[in-house]
Image: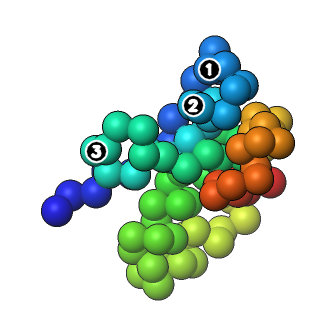
Amino acid sequence: MPFPVRFDFDVQAPTDGRHPRVHAPLGQFDGCGLAVTAPLGPAAFIDFVLRHFYGAAVCDFAHSPSVGHEVFDRTITDQESGGWHLVAPS
């Protein structure tokens, strides 16, 4: 069964805890996503995919100092961080 990997960012999402500004949807199920502490840049997303889906085959590339990560401000609310959530690289 295919399992899409996505990180969504909605800067206009309300901060009421029902739809986190940054979240990682799980599968194709509506409303099934984990809050993420901050947006991911392209390099961080590629690093995530390589590290978790290709493992040791690309470990040297994934740990290369030339692979920089943009660091974004935290968008997670206190309410969201009190539950299940993912921590973006900082």
Find residue 20 and report its image quarter.
top right
Work out whether 50 lies above or below 88. below
Q: Secondary structure at mark 3?
A: loop
Q: Secondary structure at mark 2?
A: loop
Q: What's the distance in space between the residues labelled 2 and 3, CA to CA?
A: 16 Å
Q: Is residue 68 left or right of residue 8?
A: right
What kind of residue is marked 2?
His
What kind of residue is marked 3?
Gln
What kind of residue is marked 1?
Ala
Residue designated by label 1: 13
Label 1: few (<14), some (14–19) or many (≥20) C-alpha neighbours in 10 Å: few
Question: Which residue is at a point 61% across and 52% down the rendered structure image?
Answer: 44
* First-in-chain label (1 vs 3): 1
Closer to the camera, 80 or 56? 80
Residue designated by label 2: 19
Question: Which residue is at a point 83% across and 42% down the rendered structure image?
Answer: 78
Work out whether 21 lies above or below 89. above
Residue designated by label 3: 28
Label 3: few (<14), some (14–19) or many (≥20) C-alpha neighbours in 10 Å: few
Work out whether 63 lies above or below 22. below
Closer to the camera, 77 or 54? 77
Farthest-out residue, left: 1
- Return the x and y of residue 76 as percentages of the image width and height: 75, 39
Question: Which residue is at a point 16% across and 62% down the rendered structure image?
Answer: 1
Task: Tell me, yes or no, whether the two marked residues, 1 and 2, touch with CB atoms within 8 Å.
Answer: yes
- Return the x and y of residue 9 as percentages of the image width and height: 57, 30
